[in-house]
Amino acid sequence: MSNDKVLCIGVKTSDGSPYMKIDGNVEADRDVEVYATVCGNLLCSKDCKRVLIGEGSSIQGTITAWEADIYISGKVTNRICATRVFVTSTGYVTGDIECKRIIVDEGAYVSCNIES
């Protein structure tokens, strides 16, 4: 499968904040950008190589994306399983992280167990 398209979940408003809420699990077979509040799990197939949790967005559930890099500028609570995790200065993560590599920018909030 070609990875030339991105699945966008939610919409950013003119001030950059998300305004959509999703209750339930999301499955993706391509790269994903989240601009919403998701109360559920995000499960990405092996074709997904990049997941972005936008600033002001949140995921209250498990993100499973073993073949992907995850960029967190919003909030994630629960569990993250990925190749690499990047937490930006606006990122907020609580729960557990299982990954090969994690990079945390100054100013980010990370309170979790990390297994690599």
Image (cartoon, grey):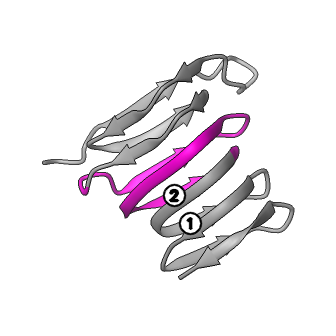
Q: Is residue 2 magenta?
A: no
Residue at 57% x, 79% y: name it.
115
Q: Residues within 10 Å of mark 2 (few under 14, many from 20)?
A: many
- Residue, disc 1: 85
Q: Main secondary structure of the magenta part?
A: strand
Dot 1 or dot 2, earlier in sequence = 2
Residue at 63% x, 39% y: name it.
60
Q: What range is drawn magenta here?
A: 46-75
Percent x, y for residue 44?
34, 48
Alpha carbon of mark 1 to alpha carbon of mark 2: how far?
5 Å
Percent x, y for residue 74?
70, 44
> Which residue occupies the extreme left position in the image?
1
Q: Residues within 10 Å of mark 1 (few under 14, many from 20)?
A: many
Amino acid type, label 1: Val
Amino acid type, label 2: Ile
* Residues under numbered marks 1 and 2 in contact, where contact means CB atoms less than 8 Å apart: yes
Percent x, y for residue 28?
32, 39
Viewed as shown, does residue 89 lie left or right of 74? right
Viewed as shown, does residue 23 lie left or right of 42? right
Residue at 53% x, 71% y: name it.
98
